[in-house]
């Protein structure tokens, strides 16, 4: 293709005046157009992003690869599975992903005689890629806060084919006072590796979604590990003081004007 032809093709693309804003976000904005359609380059990028999102959903959870770095942090691990026997069933039957398999329930029941204050559950959810990348650094950032709070921590539970509510089932069997579920979020077209955190006080299988607190988009490009760890520690501190979670516990960790209304157990930094 000659330079003249290439310049001619480029002139067909109508650039969006918001294009300068793209440097501030990974969101799909100011894509431009060719006639009434997307430019070819942007259409190809969309196809790639969609493929990456699908891959993230179907990527198997390599839980064994997390065991060594977690052991290095001084943490024991247990591996469990939900009642969904495979990925296809998990995607079609969300209800099975919310409860333990019989074998996993039997295994965890032996740990209920040594209940801990908190159980961390690391679960594949809808993006194992998110868990592989974000879970261990986040836990490493969280551990110093748990030590300051004086909370006892049970074994980290690595959960396969898991939905959010599986954390309540796990923690109920282990008789923990609270659970924090670290789970792969539904992949977006600009974020296939985003981790979500769901914290529940007094977990049991009858808990409602409104009785959990959620911290979303945990990844270096979103809410980074230090910020996410601090928010989770703040929520845990208040959950143990007030003995509640969910809509009754608002995240005020980033509002200095309200800090005098609660009794802080630690400060960031």
Image (cartoon, rainbow, N blue to C red):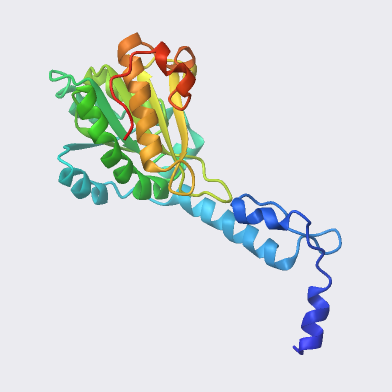
Q: Quadrant of residue 20?
A: bottom right
**Residue at x-position 59% and y-position 54%:** 50
Using residue 250 as the reference point, say whether residue 44 is left or right of it.
Answer: right
Tell me: residue 192, above or below residue 77. Answer: below
**Residue at x-position 24% and y-position 35%:** 143
**Residue at x-position 48% and y-position 24%:** 255
* Residue lying furthest top: 242
Q: Quadrant of residue 13?
A: bottom right
Percent x, y of residue 211: 44, 16
How many numbered discs? Answer: 0
Residue 129 appears in the figure: yes
Percent x, y of residue 178: 30, 20
Q: Quadrant of the C terminus?
A: top left
Using residue 34 as the reference point, say whether residue 176 is left or right of it.
Answer: left
Q: Quadrant of residue 267?
A: top left
Q: Nearer the viewer, residue 209 or 84?
A: 209
Q: Nearer the viewer, residue 132 or 87?
A: 132
* Residue lying furthest right: 35
Tell me: residue 62, above or below residue 121. Answer: below
Q: Quadrant of the N terminus?
A: bottom right
Q: Nearer the viewer, residue 138 or 126?
A: 138
Tell me: residue 45, above or below residue 5. Answer: above
**Residue at x-position 44% and y-position 15%:** 249
Using residue 61 as the reference point, say whether residue 257 is left or right of it.
Answer: right
Residue 251 appears in the figure: no
Percent x, y of residue 225: 37, 42
Q: Nearer the viewer, residue 67 or 243?
A: 243
């Amino acid at each position: 293709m000659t330079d003249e032809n290439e310049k001619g093709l480029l002139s067909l693309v109508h650039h969006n005046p918001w294009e300068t804003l793209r440097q501030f976000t990974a969101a799909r904005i100011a894509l431009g157009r060719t006639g009434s359609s997307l430019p070819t380059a942007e259409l190809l990028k969309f196809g790639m992003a969609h493929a990456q999102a699908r891959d993230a959903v179907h990527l198997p959870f390599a839980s064994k690869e997390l065991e060594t770095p977690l052991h290095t942090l001084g943490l024991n691990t247990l591996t469990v599975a939900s009642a969904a026997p495979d990925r296809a069933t998990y995607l079609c039957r969300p209800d099975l992903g919310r409860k333990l398999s019989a074998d996993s329930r039997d295994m965890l029941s032996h740990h209920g005689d040594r209940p801990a204050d908190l159980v961390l559950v690391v679960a594949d959810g809808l993006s194992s890629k998110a868990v592989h990348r974000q879970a261990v650094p986040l836990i490493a950032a969280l551990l110093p806060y748990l030590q300051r709070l004086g909370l006892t921590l049970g074994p980290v539970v690595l959960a396969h084919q898991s939905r959010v509510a599986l954390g309540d089932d796990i923690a109920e069997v282990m008789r923990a006072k609270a659970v924090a579920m670290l789970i792969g979020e539904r992949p977006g077209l600009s974020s296939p590796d985003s981790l979500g955190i769901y914290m529940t006080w007094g977990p049991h299988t009858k808990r409602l979604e409104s009785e959990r607190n959620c911290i979303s988009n945990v990844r270096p490009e979103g809410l980074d590990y230090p910020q996410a760890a601090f928010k989770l520690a703040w929520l845990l501190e208040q959950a143990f003081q007030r003995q509640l979670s969910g809509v009754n516990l608002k995240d005020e960790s980033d509002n200095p004007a309200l800090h005098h209304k609660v009794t802080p157990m630690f400060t960031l930094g």
